Image (spheres, rainbow, N blue to C red):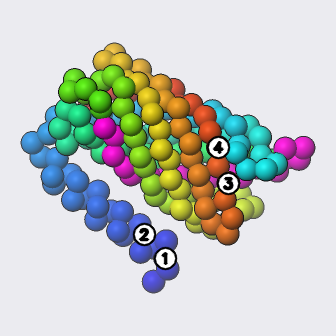
């Protein structure tokens, strides 16, 4: 069995477990975000992408986000770029008990390469941000991809989320 298939099967099992744990929690949220940043590896430039996030609450301060999207990192002075489809799960902790305000976030998962740079990478993404009760969310983040070397970017995520 390929490693990517094992990873996908494990991810599905973890998501199913979180859904069963979430039975008595608050209503889930769905969000759409824009990510913009600068590449942190030598020779990389602008990073831009978008994502969709499904987030369910364990309690008022702790949430489990599941995020998928597309990220493009340009290579300076060429027409080449790295394209990734990251699929991540993580934990989001709000520093107060309102379920809004300042938070810390840690996500990890798999990034599937798009285009010429074929393969699957491990992706990790720590962030700190602020979520307003009206649905707006702004975060400073780093996203790193590792597979036979590393590439990543530091940037911001501007998003809008709403309850389902």
What distance separates the C-alpha of mark 1 from that of mark 3?
21 Å
- Helix, strand or loop status at disc 3: strand
- Where residue 83 appears, x then y in whole percent? 67, 51
What distance separates the C-alpha of mark 3 from that of mark 4?
7 Å
Q: In this view, does 39 lie to the left or right of 1?
A: right
Circles 4 and 2 in contact, beta carbons < 8 Å:
no
User: Which residue is disc 3 drawn over?
Assistant: 151
Which quadrant holds residue 95? top left
Q: Is residue 69 left or right of residue 84?
A: left
Circles 2 and 1 in contact, beta carbons < 8 Å:
yes
- Helix, strand or loop status at disc 2: helix
What distance separates the C-alpha of mark 4 from that of mark 2?
24 Å
- Helix, strand or loop status at disc 4: strand
User: Which residue is disc 2 drawn over?
Assistant: 7
Q: If you read the primary sequence from the N terminus, does the residue marked by circle 3 or circle 2 appear first? A: 2
Residue at the image point whose x is 70% and y is 37% from the top: 38
- Where residue 67 appears, x then y in whole percent? 43, 45
Q: In this view, does 90 lie to the left or right of 46?
A: left
Circles 4 and 1 in contact, beta carbons < 8 Å:
no
User: Which residue is disc 4 drawn over?
Assistant: 153
Which quadrant holds residue 105? top left
Q: Which mark is residue 3?
A: 1
Q: Nearer the viewer, mark 3 or mark 2?
A: 3
Q: Which mark is residue 104?
A: none
Tell me: residue 37, above or below residue 67: above
Q: If you read the primary sequence from the N terminus, does the residue marked by circle 4 or circle 2 appear first? A: 2
Residue at the image point whose x is 50% and y is 47% from the top: 125
Tell me: residue 29, above or below residue 79: above
What distance separates the C-alpha of mark 4 from that of mark 1?
25 Å
Q: Nearer the viewer, mark 4 or mark 2?
A: 4
- The secondary structure that dominates the magenta segment is strand
Q: Residue furthest left?
A: 24
């Amino acid at each position: 069995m390929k490693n990517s298939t094992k990873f996908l099967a494990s991810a599905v099992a973890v998501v199913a477990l979180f859904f069963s744990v979430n039975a008595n929690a608050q209503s889930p949220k769905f969000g759409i975000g824009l990510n913009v940043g600068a590449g942190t590896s030598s020779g990389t430039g602008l990073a831009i992408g978008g994502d969709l996030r499904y987030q369910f609450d364990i309690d008022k301060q702790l949430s489990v986000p599941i995020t998928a999207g597309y990220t493009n990192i340009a290579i300076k002075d060429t027409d080449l770029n790295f394209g990734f489809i990251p699929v991540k799960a993580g934990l989001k902790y709000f520093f107060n008990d309102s379920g809004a305000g300042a938070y810390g976030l840690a996500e990890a998962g798999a990034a599937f390469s798009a285009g010429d740079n074929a393969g699957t990478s491990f992706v990790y993404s720590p962030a700190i941000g602020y979520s307003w009760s009206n649905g707006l969310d702004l975060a400073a983040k780093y996203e790193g991809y590792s597979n036979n070397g590393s590439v990543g970017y530091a940037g911001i995520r501007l998003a809008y989320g709403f309850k389902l």
